[in-house]
């Protein structure tokens, strides 16, 4: 359990968690890729 000393401390901790989760956690909805890997793969596809 986290205990935040200030609102700023909480915001920093939550932002760090969110960024880490989105950058390093594999998501089943993205075919078990990280969002970063998925975005990279999408940027290399041909667009109509």
Image (spheres, helix red, strand yellow):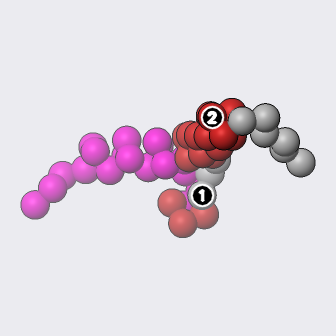
Few, some or many C-alpha atoms within 10 Å of disc 1 (few <14, some 14-19, many ≥20)? Answer: some
The residue at the far right in this view is 1
Q: Residue at x 27, y 43 (%)?
A: 44
44 in magenta: yes
> Which stretch appears magenta?
31-48
In the image, taking residue 28 as reference, residue 39 lies left or right, namely left
Quarter of the view holding residue 13: top right
Residue bearing mark 2 = 8
Can residue 20 be seen?
A: no
Where does the C terminus fall, quadrant-wise?
bottom left
9 in magenta: no
| Residue 26 rendering spot, x and y as whole percentages | 62, 51
Which element type, helix, strand or loop, lies under badge 1? loop
The residue at the far front in this view is 6
Residue bearing mark 1 = 27
Q: Residue at x 89, y 48 (%)?
A: 1
In the image, taking residue 48 as reference, residue 8 lies left or right, namely right
In the image, taking residue 43 as reference, residue 6 lies left or right, namely right
Residue in the foreground of this view, choosing between 17 and 40: 17
| Residue 41 rendering spot, x and y as whole percentages | 37, 46
First in residue order: circle 1 vs circle 2: 2
| Residue 47 rendering spot, x and y as whole percentages | 15, 56
Q: Residue at x 46, y 42 (%)?
A: 36
Measured Cα–Cα span from mark 1 to mark 2:
29 Å
Which element type, helix, strand or loop, lies under badge 2? helix
Can residue 42 be seen?
A: yes
Residue in the foreground of this view, choosing between 47 and 39: 39
Nearer mark to the viewer, of 1 and 2:
2
Residue 35's label in the rendered image is none
| Residue 20 rendering spot, x and y as whole percentages | 62, 38
């Amino acid at each position: 359990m986290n205990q935040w000393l200030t609102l700023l401390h909480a915001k920093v901790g939550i932002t760090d968690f969110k960024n880490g989760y989105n950058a390093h956690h594999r998501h089943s909805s993205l075919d078990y890729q990280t969002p970063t890997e998925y975005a990279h793969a999408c940027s290399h596809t041909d667009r109509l």
